[in-house]
Each structure stands twice: as C-alpha cells, then as structure tokens.
Amino acid sequence: MSPTSWTLEVESQAPAARLFKTFLDWHNLAPKLVPNIVASAAGIQGDGGVGSIRQINFTSVMPFGYVKERLDFVDHDKFECKQSLVEGGDLGKKIESASSHFKFEPTSKGGCVCKVVTTYKPLPGVEMKDEITKGKEAVTGIIKAAEAYLLANPRAYA
C-alpha cells in the first residue's frame, strides 16, 4: 500500500514558543499531566536534538504498551518539528511506518494554532479509519493538556 496522511489543526490560548517547548519535553511532562494514559517516559538516546529517541510507556487504557519516537527535524525559530515512530505502537502490526510533522503558528491573540500532518504506510489489507480518529483525538488531548498546564503555570517553559 502507498503512504497516506491526515491533517489536524488545534487552536490554543498558549503562546506558540511555550507550547512548542512542552511538546519537545513531552516525555518529562506527560506522566505528570496525563498519568491515566502515560505511565512513564524518558529520553533514551541522544541529547534531545535531531536523532534523539524517547520512549513513552502507556497504562492499560491504551491498546499497546509503548512507543519509541525519533526526532527527525526541529526548527526552534519556526516552532516546528518532525518525529518518526521507530518501535512499538502499531508498527509492524498495522503500519509499516509513521511520522508526524508539527508546526505551532502564533496568532494575533497571543495563542497559536498547532498544525499536524501525520503520514503513515499501512500494512497490506489493513484499514486505518478508526486509528485516524483515535490519533486525532490523542493529539488534540496532548495539546489541550499542555495548554492547560501552561495557562495554570505562566512561568513554565517561558
């Protein structure tokens, strides 16, 4: 099967620079903000820059135990990054590969719009409709959890 993609835009009241920083640090923040979903997480290779890998371990509410993500691209000035799934999740079960590109664009009101493009290659015969809906819900939930944290903690990730 050929690669396909889905897109998502999520508006946030949090400033782009701060929300972008929380996203890059999600492996440290997620277990604190969404402990019902993320049991633990850590950077397991690299210094947090391009090529670094982080592992996110999930609770039993998720259909898989963990994912390992590699940071493929980061632009701190434009608040954008790209990461690829390198292990875990549905890799090898439903998909051959997956990557997501995130861009946090400032708005005139001081918040931002997070634009997401996820590209994946399903394994032959696999239908991904439900997974796309769940993926969009998960990304929206991550952004909204980080936004709530930033609004409650104005000095965090400043």
Image (cartoon, rainbow, N blue to C red):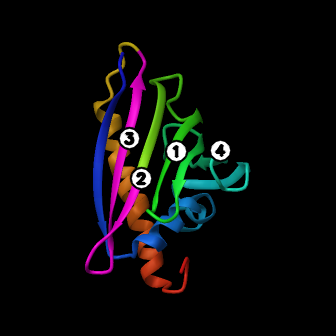
Residue beneath the point at 44% across and 62% down: 78
Residue beneath the point at 43% across and 59% down: 142
Tell me which amino acid carries mark 3.
Thr
Q: Quadrant of the N terminus?
A: top left
Q: Which residue is mark 1?
A: 83
Q: x and y percent of residue 11 in the render?
A: 28, 66
For marks 4 and 1, the one nearer the N-term is: 4
The secondary structure that most of the magenta stretch takes on is strand
Q: Is 132 situated above or below 25?
A: above
Q: Residues within 10 Å of mark 1 (few under 14, many from 20)?
A: many
Q: Farthest residue to the front: give it.
A: 77
For marks 3 and 2, the one nearer the N-term is: 2
What secondary structure is marked by label 3? Answer: strand
Q: Number of marks in the image?
A: 4
Q: x and y percent of residue 101 in the render?
A: 42, 47
Mark-to-mark CA distance, 1 and 2: 9 Å
The disc placed on residue 51 is: 4
Pointer 1 with pointer 2, Cβ within 8 A: yes
Mark-to-mark CA distance, 1 and 3: 10 Å
Mark-to-mark CA distance, 3 and 4: 18 Å
Q: Farthest residue to the top: give it.
A: 124
Q: Which residue is mark 2?
A: 102
Q: Which residue is mark 3?
A: 118
For marks 1 and 2, the one nearer the N-term is: 1
What secondary structure is marked by label 4? Answer: loop
Pointer 4 with pointer 1, Cβ within 8 A: no
Q: Nearer the viewer, residue 4 or 130?
A: 4
Tell me which amino acid carries mark 4.
Gly
